[in-house]
Amino acid sequence: MNKLLFAAFFCLSALAARAEIVTIGNAELARLAARGVPVIDVRTEKEWKETGVIPGSRLITYFDENGKSNPPQWLEKFKAVAAPGQPVILVCRSGRRSAAATQFLAEQAGYKTVYNVGQGINGWVAEGRAVVAPPLR
């Protein structure tokens, strides 16, 4: 039994060790998105309407307006956009909420390469990069 537990622990540790969370800036975000890496905006609908969204991004709220999240429910929506073997980019307002979501994906959901936009949409807009109105929901 101890050998089985050790083997399971070793396998889980190896999987976690291979997960990669990379904080990126806007130039890298633009480059990766142009190559087809999905961009997921984890902000709230109200925030999307206030600032607009990065063209082509998918909108899947991670924390609601009250700061609560339901990672398993969010993951079900997320998997429709990107499979665990596929790299993904997450963005929020400033990089903090997307950092929490990237950590969840890498450590608990089996995603191997997850990019977090370090300055969030605020940095994107501050550089004068394009945003579009979010799609009607």
Image (cartoon, grey):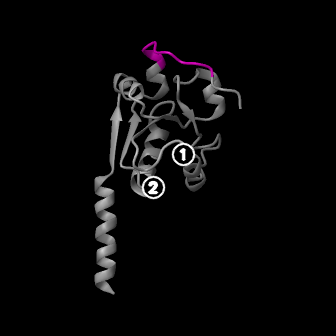
Depth check, front residue: 93 or 24: 24
Q: Are marks 2 and 1 in contact (CB under 8 Å)?
A: yes
- The C terminus - image quarter: top right
- Given the image, on which type of amino acid does mark 2 rest? Ala
Question: What is the x, y in percent for residue 66?
Answer: 64, 43
Q: Which mark is residue 86?
A: none
Cα–Cα span, label 2 and label 1: 11 Å
Q: Which residue is mark 2?
A: 109
Q: Is 122 contained in the magenta span?
A: no
Q: Which residue is mark 1?
A: 78
Image quadrant assignment for residue 36 = top left
Residue at coordinates 62% horizontally, 35% vertically from top-left?
Answer: 44
Vertical relation: 7 (above or below) 81: below
Which badge, 2 or 1, is on the more N-terminal residue? 1
Residue range highlighted in magenta: 125-133
Mark 2: few, some, or many residues within 10 Å (few <14, many ≥20)?
A: some
Q: Is residue 135 left or right of residue 30?
A: right
Query: Mark 1 Cα within 10 Å, few/some/many (few <14, many 20+)?
Result: many
**Residue at the location (39% across, 49% down)?**
85
> Residue at left 33%, top 87%?
1
Q: Measured along the vertical axis of the image, is residue 23 above or below residue 3?
A: above
